[in-house]
Image: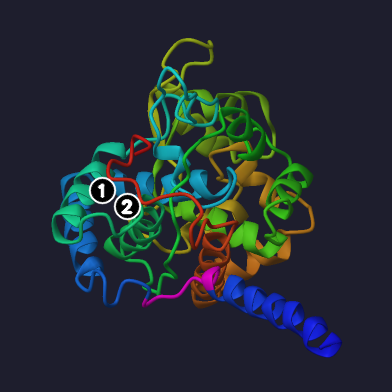
Amino acid sequence: MASSSFHAPTLVSILVLLLGNSRAQLTPDFYEDSCPDLLNIVQAQVEIAVQNEKRMGASLLRLFFHDCFVNGCDGSILLDDTPTLIGEKNAAPNANSVRGFEVIDVIKAAVEEACPGVVSCADILAITAKDSVVQLGGPDWEVKLGRRDAMTASQAAANSSIPPPTSNLDQLISKYAAQGLSAQDMVALSGAHTIGQARCTTFRNHIYQETNIDSFFANTRKPNCPGTPGQGDNNLAPLDIQTPTLFDNSYFVNLVAMKGLLHSDQELFNGGSTDAIVQNYSQNPDAFIQDFITAMIKMGDINPLTGSDGEIRTNCRLVN
């Protein structure tokens, strides 16, 4: 009798541990039975959005990044402010900058029509990020799924966790390390700046005050970005001057030529520890693409809510 009473809790503990690990495991076929047409639905809507506006592809990719860096990939960035919840949309890295929420609304509505109450907004962000890359000529990969949605958000965490464009190399490495991402992951993910645009206010100081920038390149940016703060702050410039709507390795070619638009961009190739990675990606696009895929999958694994944690939001902007 003593023997059986000793072993029973041990077996239960082992089963709980195994079930917990199983539940936490994201997998590409998570919705294979519950929403079999999910990937096609999302792809179709992303294709429409990017065809309507090329820049939207970069914006949707950035949404996923800004979501995952704040308490994990849980869809918290999508929550609107309410009388009882302060969301992340008005945090310093996001206000007047992060965009694409209406596209996510459209995708979510299409998914809900096909599979009501099944697919999380967090997973929709992950799929949308991949499809946006594909639509702009980048690689395809299997997205791991099974995330659930947060029921809260953190503006404070958004302010502290997302690296600003003023970051130096040590700060960038530290911010990514805090998310379990290596310096190589950081450089590969920064390659997302091969698409999209930035506001004048984020690169003004770099083009006017700093010396680690090609002077001709800096001068080409100045007419659309006056040196006086407050003037033209929201004017846009491409992050990749060569192919701003094509997902390729030109971003790294630009960095080697000292044509990084943001201070934080050029920090990756500025006599520091990541110079060799940038140099390799500038010469070997296949290496960049492979490492980008690896880093995106790794980023998608940051602290997902699974099992019975969180919820499946009906409206991505609001807790159920």
* Furthest residue toward right: 2
Front-lying residue, 242 or 317: 317
Say left or right for 267 vs 252. Answer: right
Front-lying residue, 114 or 212: 114
* Furthest residue toward front: 1
**Which residue is under mark 1?**
54
Looking at the rendered structure, the secondary structure element under dot 1 is loop
Q: Is residue 24 magenta?
A: yes
Q: Quadrant of residue 32?
A: bottom left
**Which residue is under mark 2?**
245
Say left or right for 202 vs 220. Answer: right
- Residue 281 % position (x, y): 58, 68
Is there any visible trace of residue 242 in the rendered image? yes
Residue 68: assigned label: none
Q: In which quarter of the image is residue 315?
A: top left
Which residue is pictured at 82% across the width and 82% down the height? 6
Q: How far apart are marks 2 and 1 (CA)?
A: 6 Å
Mark 2 vs 1, N-terminal side: 1
Q: Does the magenta stretch include residue 270?
A: no
Q: Magenta residues? A: 23-29
Q: Could you tell me what secondary structure mostly forms the magenta stretch?
A: loop
- Residue 217 % position (x, y): 51, 38
Quarter occupied by the C terminus: top left
- Mark 1, Cα crowd under 10 Å, few <14 / some 14-19 / many 20+, is some
- Mark 2, Cα crowd under 10 Å, few <14 / some 14-19 / many 20+, is many
Disc 2 and disc 1 in contact, CB within 8 angstroms = yes
Say left or right for 204 vs 273. Answer: left
Which residue is pictured at 32% across the width and 65% down the height? 134
